[in-house]
Image (cartoon, rainbow, N blue to C red):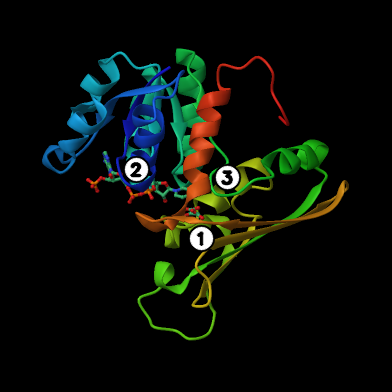
Amino acid sequence: MDIGLIGSGAIGQYLLKKINEDSHPELHIGHILVRNTAKYRHLEGDYGVVLHTDVEAFLASDIDMVVEAANVATVQALLPHVIRKKDTMLISVGALADEQLLVETARLAEAHATRLHLPSGAVGGLDLIQNAKTFGNLERVELTTRKPASSLTGESITEEKTVFHGKAFEAIEKFPKNMNVSIILSLAGLGINETDVRLIADPAIEKNIHEIRLAGDFGEAVLTIKNNPLPENPKTSALAALSILGTLERVPGNIRYGN
Ligand SMILES: NC(=O)C1=CN([C@@H]2O[C@H](COP(=O)(O)OP(=O)(O)OC[C@H]3O[C@@H](n4cnc5c(N)ncnc54)[C@H](OP(=O)(O)O)[C@@H]3O)[C@@H](O)[C@H]2O)C=CC1
Ligand SMILES: O=C([O-])CC(=O)C(=O)O
């Protein structure tokens, strides 16, 4: 599968290393959309990619799938163009808290016979949440995220501090670089107005820890994911990059596990 990448930061460069440098047998990144060619010129030599600054030229290239690893604002700006032309995978899923964008994307994907893939990112358990939701029998979904204090606040704190408590729609507005997980959980479960979110800055941890609690007719579940951060961007968990890689590997498969 030929991949076009949007975003060449911590996740993008992880994907370039794993797919192109380590030479993945089924995947190849050939094109990257950037906004600053000089900053990323070295990627051409390092990974044999073509850089683009024009989205239409990027989409006209020989790619099967666009993978976004940029930010929420870029998804908001580009998704309607991209989904018309290419199957698309997003990691900045917080953009889909905008219901109009979600509905319009679904309409365009149907009209143009493309697909939108939303990997599970830095969390898991989306299969369980979706199954528990069928026939409206999911009652409660709560997310508590703890990140190293330095990822969330400029203040020097010595004790943990709740920096946000509220619903997912507000969490992503206030913390678009940290709360994409709240939106994928909302999309799988009870929606952005019903998913409870707490975000804690913790000076005593080095991992990004997500605890998901849910309850419904199925029973109750508690999932805790203790994520190692990517060194290049400690806000971002390595599992987010792995979830893109794993989803890319599974796309062509004929057997599906857990969905
Ligand atoms: N769903 C989930 O569970 C998770 C989602 N994420 C999200 O994934 C995304 C990527 O994370 P990460 O790699 O750590 O971020 P980084 O900040 O390390 O990298 C972002 C990259 O995107 C590029 N970029 C920004 N805007 C554009 C644009 N308009 N066109 C092309 N490139 C652009 C930046 O380029 P430049 O140098 O020009 O700024 C940079 O290369 C973020 O939105 C993050 O919040 C992260 C972790 C978990
Ligand atoms: O990487 C993580 O642990 C979560 C994150 O940044 C996000 O959801 O935006």
Instruction: Write down the residue under mark 2.
Output: 70
Quarter of the image for residue 222 reads bottom right
Could you tell me how far apart the alpha carbons at marks 3 and 1 are, in whole angstroms? 12 Å
Q: What's the residue type where badge 1 is placed? A: Ala
Residue 116 image position (x, y, % from top left): 50, 27
Q: Secondary structure at mark 3?
A: helix
Q: Quadrant of the C terminus?
A: top right
Left or right side of 21 for 252: right
Q: Determine if the C-beta at disc 3 is less than 8 A from ligand 1.
A: yes
Left or right side of 182 for 176: left
Number of the front mark, 2 or 3: 2
Instruction: Write down the residue under mark 1.
Output: 171
Residue occupying image coordinates x 65% and y 14%:
254
Q: Determine if the C-beta at disc 2 is less than 8 A from ligand 1.
A: yes
Residue 143 image position (x, y, % from top left): 64, 59
Number of the front mark, 1 or 2: 2
Could you tell me how far apart the alpha carbons at marks 1 and 2 are, in whole angstroms? 19 Å
Q: Quadrant of the N terminus?
A: top left
* Front residue (pair 126, 1): 1
Residue located farthest toward the bottom when viewing the structure as drawn: 158
Residue located farthest toward the left when viewing the structure as drawn: 38
Q: Secondary structure at mark 2?
A: loop
Instruction: Write down the residue under mark 3.
Output: 184
Task: Rate crowding at label 1 as few (under 14), some (14 to 19) or many (20 or more) other CA atoms within 10 Å.
Answer: many
Answer with mark 3 or mark 1, whichever residue precedes in sequence: 1
